[in-house]
Image: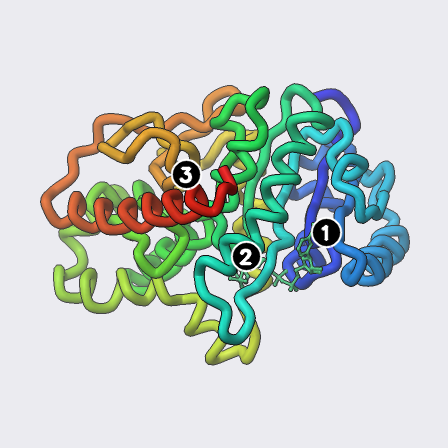
Amino acid sequence: FSSPVTVTLTGAGGQIGYALLFRIASGQLLGPDVPVRLQLLEIPAGIAGAEGAALELEDGAFPLLDSVEVTDRAARAFNGTQMALLVGSRPRGPGMERADLLAANGAIFGPQGAAINEHAASDIRVVVVGNPANTNALIAQSHAPDVPRERFTALTRLDHNRALGQLAARLTVPVRDIDGVTIWGNHSASQYPDVSHATAGGTPVRDLVDEEWLTREFIPRVANRGAEIIEVRGSSSVGSAASATIDHVHDWVNGQRSRWTSVALPSDGSYGVPDGLVSSFPAESVDGQWRIVQGLELDEFSKSRIAASVAELATEREQVQGLGLL
Ligand code: NDP
């Protein structure tokens, strides 16, 4: 990285943006010695929220924060950016069909991909948080032909962290003792949280929990945790989404602490996932690049669960192709 690092955040006036900004400014995104220049993108309706947050960032007197700029112009926001966090997206409104949602988000992520292609730094890396995150990442990536495609990722780290949390609670061990968990597929209820290769304190998780708990409680609870949080908290899981976004980028830049983590990135055909689909895989960060962990054995149950989620991603790709968004 050159110093300071230019970081772009879209949807900066929203809730996840608000939870992210202070952690970025304090050095938790890139590291405690890395100065940051923030470029915040919002639509006109969100500008006031982003400007208010920028005032608070000034009041935070963060030693690592060199500057904050708020804009509603993508060309400006992505100018020279090295790390883009694409959080702003169009939420599903009442009566909105999935195709409407995909079309609305295509209108956001297509132009953002093009702006990244044209204006970002050559070492640009992108993480998409705004839903439907995998397909939004695919749309953005397809509009940035000059950027190596593996630099476009979508967030499944929140699902990964949720899986770690559930296992730690069940086994009454600290989260740091658990390793080898994978989220496969789409960041949606079809995702497959896989513990086949997971260990707790070195012991295979499969030896510590029964099949019934895994299939009837663990998998659905992780996959539907977002709805559970909304029900209990009365609003969505903003803090944990921001926290997982920090983890994703931090590990991408600095390497992960565990054997691997979960990242949605364009498939190279690994594990039978069709080329180009932005699907979640086990991934390790090597020299600042995500590499899909190869050679994990998959049993029939895992294969069928992965295939089901990947089929959903393929359908989403067909839909956005049909809408002319790729
Ligand atoms: P949030 O900040 O709460 O959420 C932003 C996006 O993150 C949504 O798409 C949301 O998906 C997604 N998300 C991913 N994981 C999670 C999770 N675990 N919990 C909750 N959300 C998750 O939304 P706000 O409405 O508060 O803010 C969005 C901001 O984006 C607004 O200020 C809006 O103006 C802005 N925006 C900016 C754009 C731009 O910069 N060009 C374009 C469009 C909007 P889901 O909808 O499924 O909850």
Q: Residue at x 77, y 39 (%)?
A: 77
Q: In the structure shown, which secondary structural element does the residue marked by tag 3 occupy?
A: strand
Q: Mark 2 against mark 3, which lies toward the viewer?
A: 3
Position of the N terminus by quadrant: top right
Secondary structure type for disc 2? helix
For marks 2 and 1, the one nearer the N-term is 1
Residue occupying the point 77% across, 35% down: 75
Question: Is residue 174 in view from this perspective?
Answer: no
- Residue at mark 1: 21
Instruction: Using the numbered discs, state the Cα–Cα distance from disc 3 to disc 1 in whole angstroms.
Output: 26 Å
Residue sitting nearer the eye, 113 or 283: 113
**Residue in the foreground of this view, choosing between 269 and 75:** 75
| Quarter residue 211 falls in | bottom left
- Dot 3 or dot 1, earlier in sequence: 1
Residue 94, percent from left and from top: 53, 75
Q: Earlier in the sequence, mark 2 or mark 3?
A: 2
Q: Which residue is mark 3?
A: 278
Q: How many marks?
A: 3
